[in-house]
Amino acid sequence: MQNETKRVPPGLRVLLVEDEPLIAIDGDDMLRAMGVDDVVWVRTVTEGVNALGSATFHAALLDLRLGQESSIPLAQRLAANNIPFGFLTGFQDNAIPQEFKDRPVVVKPFTAAQLGALLSGLVGPPA
């Protein structure tokens, strides 16, 4: 059986915005298995803003709901900085504001193949 894990270009740094530790750990493991060099995991909008202010990211994966807050302020910041991003969410499509309806969405729970397809769509295939 072939390995179905998508590979990504080398040297990637990905921002993973997720408030549930088990989902974040699984996501981190899946991303690293794809070849992502650095996964920065944050749980809140404030942590995400701080991460964006201190590092350069090639892509971001956002849980739509972070406890009582929404990740939309991070999505707006990412869009303003031309950093590709997509949503990982358990919510239906209508929970995403109109301004981000064009962004890719993977519904939780997700598989490594779904996460790989999302990330490859954001950053492109390996060279």
Image: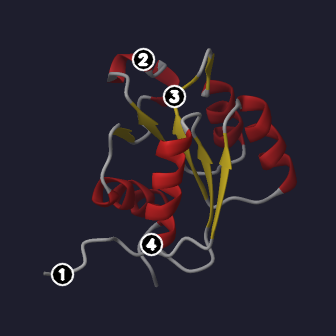
- Tell me residue 104's x, y (percent): 40, 42
97 left or right of 109?
right
- Tell me residue 91's x, y (percent): 37, 22
* Residue contact between numbered discs 2 and 3, judged by CB atoms under 8 Å: yes
- Label at residue 95: 2
Instruction: Residue type at mark 4: give it.
Output: Ala
Give 77 or 1, whichever is nearer the viewer.
Answer: 1
Instruction: Residue type at mark 2: give it.
Output: Ala
Q: Please, is residue 41 above or below residue 106 in the view?
A: below
The residue mark sitting in front, 4 or 2, is 4
- Which secondary structure, mark 3? loop
| Marks 4/1: CA–CA distance | 15 Å
| Marks 4/2: CA–CA distance | 30 Å
Q: How many marks?
A: 4
The residue that label 1 is drawn on is 2
The residue that label 3 is drawn on is 64
The residue that label 4 is drawn on is 33
Image quadrant assignment for residue 93: top left
Give whichever of discs 1 and 3 has the lower sequence position. 1
User: Which residue appears at 39% of the width and 54% of the height?
Assistant: 118
* Residue contact between numbered discs 4 and 3, judged by CB atoms under 8 Å: no
Instruction: Residue type at mark 3: give it.
Output: Leu
